[in-house]
Structures are given as C-alpha cells and as structure tokens.
Image (spheres, helix red, strand yellow):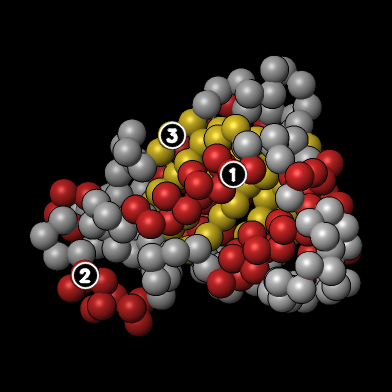
Amino acid sequence: MEKLSRRNFFKIVGIGAATFFLSGCGLNAVADEKNVSAQKKVSGGNKMKIVLINSSPHSESESTSRYLAQKFIEGAKSAGHEIFTFDAANEETHPCKGCNHCGMDGDCIFNDAISQKLMPKMLEADLLVFVTPLYYYGMSAQLKIIVDRFYSRTTKLNGKKSIFMATAWNSADWTFEALKNHYETLVRYMSWEDCGQIWAIGCGYRSAVENSEFGDAAYKIGASL
C-alpha cells in the first residue's frame, strides 16, 4: 500500500513475516532474488520501443510505484531506448463491456485514451512495462482496465516482451503471490517473453522505497535491456 492511513491494517496482516523481509518499517527493504528478476540484453543491442503504463492514483512525488517507473525509465534511456508512458490513473479510460464489438481484432466501442493514445503505441512496441501499487492483493483497478482491454487486439499483442513492477506496504512472503500468478498467466496466454519482475515489499510510502534497493534494481533492469 502507498498511504500511511493503511499502516495499522498491514501491520496486522504482515505480523510474523515482517521482521525477515523488512527492517525499520520499510526503510531497509531488501531487493533479493525472490523479489527481483531480470533477463539481460534482450534488445540484442538494438533500440527498442517501450511502452510503460503507470497506474497509481498518487502523484509523481508521492507514489512508490511511480518511483520505480522513474528509475526504470532513467535506466532504459541511458541504454538508448525509446519510451512512451501512459498514465492510466489520470487518462480517460473505460472498462471492457464484453460486447465483442471489436471481434478480438478491431476498434473498441470506446474511443477513449486507450484507443487513441495507448493501443497504437502498444501495437508497435517491442516491450510492455506494467507498474502498479498493490492494494487488495491484486493490480490496481486502473491497470486492470487496461489489461481487460487487451481483448480488442489479443492476437496483435502476442509475442511481445514484458516487465512487471509493483510496490506494497505489506512485507509477508505471500504479499505478491496472487498478483505474480496473474502476471505470469498473462505472459503465458499472450506468448510474451518476461524480461523482469520487481516485487517491492515493505514500500508503503515514498521514503521507504527511496531508501530500499528496489529503485536501483529498476534502473539496472532498464539499463541492461
């Protein structure tokens, strides 16, 4: 979670595991092999077109997940890659109605920011990067809207590379279990190549993630592409 108001709830949820994964209420969160994975040099030395989707409703200066996105972007730009960012929390978007107007390979019935701005970039992208805070043990509602709208271009979105990054207040070892399974199921269904995952436990507020190792990990994944 990102907000301090949720602190007491997650203290209770994470009791028993918090000491192992988190010291000092998040100030020393450790990015170990379980919480960070990356593949190297997937670009083959070529410039990649990357689409990054932010989905936190909080500001750039306050959000923990947006911090990871910023660090990844810095790293990817240092390697010469082209990046388009989409702010799912602050753009006009609509959830899939399941109406099949698109026929799984056509225009969505909603001519919103997803159709106008995001989907054209996703279709031409080499790599898709998804960034979310964890609230109730899944991706944010803002990101889920985007994922459900994949339906309109399912086949054409197949075969791309992907990265997933998430932050949470909780530090129990099962914190990201459901979300990780969801992402890896998408990778399998969409025939994507997973190029990195960051599961930033114990990062419930900005200073926590800034003082953790997850920001450096996000930068390195971007720079290593």
Identified at 51% across, 36% down, the residue is 196
Mark 2, residue position: 13
Mark 1, residue position: 189
The three-letter amino acid code for the residue at tag 3 is Ser
Query: Of marks 2 and 1, which one's residue comes earlier in the chain?
Result: 2
Q: In terms of image quadrants, where is residue 91?
A: bottom right
Q: Residues within 10 Å of mark 1 (few under 14, many from 20)?
A: few
Query: Of marks 3 and 2, which one's residue comes earlier in the chain?
Result: 2
The three-letter amino acid code for the residue at tag 1 is Tyr
Identified at 33% across, 78% down, the residue is 6
Question: Do the CB atoms of the residues marked 3 and 2 lie less than 8 Å apart?
Answer: no
Q: Quadrant of the C terminus?
A: top right
Mark 3, residue position: 37
Judge left or right: residue 14 versus residue 200: left
Local SS, label 3: strand
Q: Position of residue 174 (x, y in %)?
A: 27, 55
Q: Position of residue 135 (x, y in %)?
A: 42, 70
Q: Position of residue 127 (x, y in %)?
A: 69, 38
Query: Of marks 1 and 3, which one's residue comes earlier in the chain?
Result: 3
Q: Nearer the viewer, residue 187 or 161?
A: 187
